[in-house]
Image (cartoon, rainbow, N blue to C red):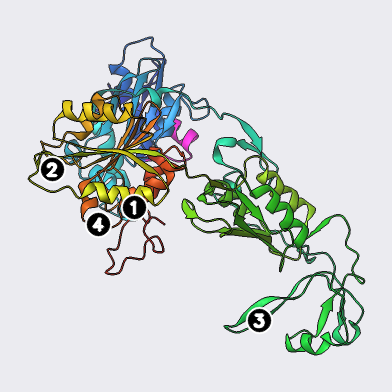
Amino acid sequence: MTNQTKEGQTSPSYQDHEGTLYSFDDLLELIRSFHGHVAPGVIIGAAMVHKVLSLMPEGILFDVICETFNCLPDAVQLLTPCTVGNGWLKVYDFGRFALTLYEKYEGKGIRVFMDPEKAKDWSEIRNWYLKLTPKREQDSSLLMEQIRRAGTGILGCQEVEIAPCFRQKEGLGEVIICPLCGEAYPSKDGGICRPCQGETPYVLTGHSDKDESSPPLKKIPLKKAVGHRVLHDMTMIVPRKEKGALFKNGQRITVGDLCRLQQMGRQSLYVIDENRINSQWIHEDEAALAFGRSMAGDGVTFTESPSEGKVNFMALRDGLFVVDEKKMEMFNLLPGVMCACRHGYTVVSRGDSLAGTRAVPLFLTISEFNKAMTLLSGTPFFRVAKIRKASVGILVTGTEVFQGWVEDSFIPIIRSKVERFGCHVLQSLIVPDDRRAICKGVKNLLDMGTELLITTAGLSVDPDDVTRQGLIDAGLEDVLYGAPILPGAMTLLGRIGKTQVIGVPACALYFKNTSLDLLLPRLLAGLTITSTDLASMGHGAFCLECKKCTFPVCPFGK
């Protein structure tokens, strides 16, 4: 990697993918023309590319991974055909000054990185690399000289193999039109594009003197309002006692109403007769009703007569309240609209209040309304899933219980929890900590017609705890072991055929409420619980162990 300078000193040369060699000075000019200025990171990056090219077999098709966005990708794009644009260069911003060149299809390659141990003999390189000296205090001449002299001597390398998931070029997938900005984007990003979700570098700089947040409305003095119909609900609030729409949209004002309106602080009113609104505007009541029809799914109804511009949702039956949280979040990112609901996965009764939605201003533009309705198309926000009355089999594991050394306490605990939902316990079995005995017990319960199998204990790290292994021997599939729930971290979920399985750790003997109380309603509602579902439960799944338990009216599981 060296040649002779005019002064007789050795100077490194740098090779690109076609075998062209560049002297150190030529490289600096190349970097200046491509990168904008001569950056130490690009020079060292060129040495890394040179080194890895010299170690790879000739004639192969290769891709490159960079582990930082700083400088290094430009060295790759300068000396190889791999660019961010053609997808042959992938950048994972780990903050490490390293790159990997690998065979495109098999994934075998060489990773080259800045080695701090090798750089310790080069003081200015070390100061630059580890940010030990502020940039303005660095000796740039000495830094360049040390980079020239060090060449590839400050680099480490290792053989690696890229995982298949990282070798694949990820496509956009389905492309749809964002209902907010009207531009195309990948549907996998959600109901609206990521910039419209707030991930945008742009600040709105334009402005208009014209207020387009509502149509031009004419108000009339209160003393002239008799005989006119009000344009919207008007709310009366008695502190700590009463709040409600005292006057409804379209209600005609009488002489007797004037005093009451004055008490409400009204000195002027919007009335229907004086405001003819064209089709480019949607009244809050009309918008709320349209939102309600789209958001209410199976087992949910809503108020057909909006109040104060809002419709509320109620449960049509007993069951589990299920919310499309992602879609609801997208809706609430749209301007001029809102929706709020109680916690999802809450057990509700017929007639319980679930949620409310409305337009924020008195009128929405037809454009804003259409954007909201486009987002609402497809599946509804809310549904109440039926909680079935399952046939339950209980399998208690533990040699100490099986032998009678310890009295069982699990069966009455589990029985009381499932019977609360109307379930029937088919059979309860107690087996020792033995894989074959556990497997046999499971099969016996399945033969009885068990729809939900609940096992207890034997799920810890102790060598005698073999419940999980016994379940797998009995055919357990789709196993999820471990949950971010306290108490209940060692919970197990899975299925054997069509039978749902939940393994309850021994902590349920001590704590009144555990992971079982959070997961049981979902299982009885027939919901599939994924690892992502469990991961998302971690936020709020920490029991405070209050002296007086008020679950489920408490933060646990919310």
Badge 3 marks a residue whose secondary structure is strand
Which residue corresponds to mark 3?
Answer: 237
**Inter-mark Cα distance, 4 to 2:** 19 Å
Which residue corresponds to mark 1?
Answer: 135
Nearer the N terminus, badge 4 or badge 2?
Answer: 2
Quadrant location of the N terminus in the rendered image: top left
Badge 4 marks a residue whose secondary structure is loop
Q: What segment is highlighted magenta in the picture?
A: 30-39
Q: From the top left corner, tell me how far across and down residue 536 is, in percent.
A: 40, 47
| Residue at the image point whose x is 79% and y is 70% from the top | 232
**Inter-mark Cα distance, 2 to 1:** 69 Å
Q: Callout 1 environment at 10 Å: few (<14), some (14 to 19), or many (20+)?
A: few
Q: Is residue 555 above or below residue 477?
A: below
Which residue corresponds to mark 4?
Answer: 511
Q: Closer to the observer: label 2 or label 3? A: 2
Nearer the N terminus, badge 3 or badge 1?
Answer: 1
